[in-house]
Image: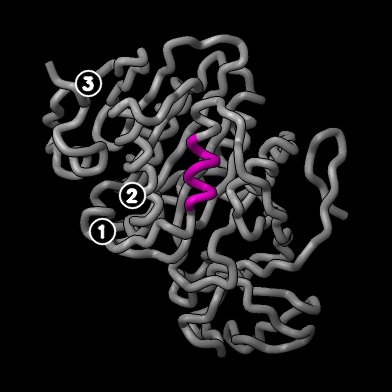
Amino acid sequence: MSNSLFRQSFLIDSLYSDGALLSSEYTTDDGVLLKLHGPGILEVIPPHIDEQTQHIVVSCAIHGKDAGPVELVNRIVSDIDSGFQPVREHCLFIIAHLEALKHHTRFFDENLERLFDDKPREPSQELVIADNLKVLLKSFWKDTPSDQRWHFDLHSTLNPSLYHSFAISPKVRHPVRPKELIHFAELAHLDAMVLANAPSSSFSWYTADCYSARSLAIELGQSSRLGQSPLEGFNAFDITLRDLCAREINEHLPRKIKFYRVSRTIVRLNEDFDFIFADDVKNFTAFMHGEVFGNDGDKPLMAKNEGEAILFPDKHVPIGEPALLMVCPVTVRYEQNQLVYD
């Protein structure tokens, strides 16, 4: 009798399965059920589910260059499979874009991270993935309390960053910034958190908007290839996520986070579009009020606030797509258990 769900690992089996999986289910000696729904989709069901059970989604590889988060998720799943990592919450682990990951490219036809709205789109393999993930989440969170739904969408940045790790909290109509979520981020020793100011089409926005989930897009280091990802700098995040899945008390201390708000999104409008700064400029690089950092046609791009900083700059996006976010430091507080700012 097999003592593992996988031939090699969750990651390797998913990448090279060709649809032929060794088994679809496996129960550990502790009664934890691992249920493989297909390549890259693993549900983990604890022995007991009650009214306190949390329903946690951990996704990665929305982009194919996000190897570090993928390897972190694979390591956690391997420890669950072996029985080393206890699980007392209902979990779903997703490696989203396996083909892009295999070819070390962000995407093939379209940016998957921009396909989680309801706009009509041309067929693409990324659109198929987005639609399948929507169906999957509908089933996973069916009849679960909204305040017990969590989603951590793990990424890594193309550009280096002033912060080794940071999160983006989506802006939605529901109260999805509770103190418990911020405490998780502090325990995970995330360096910064960006508070979005408008709806988007990202995966974390979708889960927050449609399911009122406690959702964060979390950036862990810089993009890398499989097997070349330094994970040591994310030990606190790894431990905190494991503790959440195991319903265990954290033994380490939280760390304060630097908060930013999105002040505006710069959308490319012209063919003549460029930045003055280098292509490898660091995320969160700040500018003085009025300082010019690029142009869109005849219009100069400049900082409109003192200390306004750049995030995710990409001058090669198609016309009509966001080319970067501008963010500003912000002071936060809690009202009715929700994080807010003035």
Question: Please, which residue is most extreme toward the front here?
Answer: 251
Amino acid under disc 1: Gly
Q: Position of residue 330 (x, y in %)?
A: 80, 61
Instruction: Between residue 221 and residue 115, name the one nearer to us.
Output: 221
Q: Quadrant of the N terminus?
A: top left
Q: Nearer the viewer, residue 244 or 21?
A: 244
Q: How would you rate the neighbour count of disc 1 (Cα within 10 Å): few for under 14, some for 14-19, many for 20 or more?
A: few
**314 relative to 201, above or below:** below
**Where are the magenta residues, as a range?**
235-242
Q: Residues within 10 Å of mark 3 (few under 14, many from 20)?
A: few
Q: Nearer the viewer, residue 304 or 338?
A: 338
- The residue where tag 2 is placed is 71
Q: Is residue 229 visible?
A: yes
Q: Residue 166's x, y, as percent?
A: 58, 58
Nearer-N-terminus badge (1/2):
2
Query: CA gap, disc 1 to disc 3?
Result: 26 Å
Q: Position of residue 93 (x, y in %)?
A: 39, 34
Three-letter residue code for mark 3: Ser
- Of discs 3 and 2, which sits in the foreground? 2
Q: Which residue is mark 3?
A: 24
Q: Which residue is mark 1?
A: 227
Asked whether disc 3 touches disc 2, contact meaning CB atoms under 8 Å apart, the reply is no
Residue type at mark 2: give it: Glu
Q: Position of residue 21 (x, y in %)?
A: 15, 28
Dot 2 alpha-carbon crowd within 10 angstroms: few under 14, some 14 to 19, many 20 or more? many
Element carrying mark 2: helix
Tell me: 270 left or right of 5.
right
Q: Is residue 236 magenta?
A: yes
Q: Nearer the viewer, mark 1 or mark 3?
A: 1
Q: Earlier in the sequence, mark 3 or mark 2?
A: 3
**In the image, residue 9 lies in the stretch drawn in magenta:** no
Q: Are marks 1 and 2 in contact (CB under 8 Å)?
A: yes
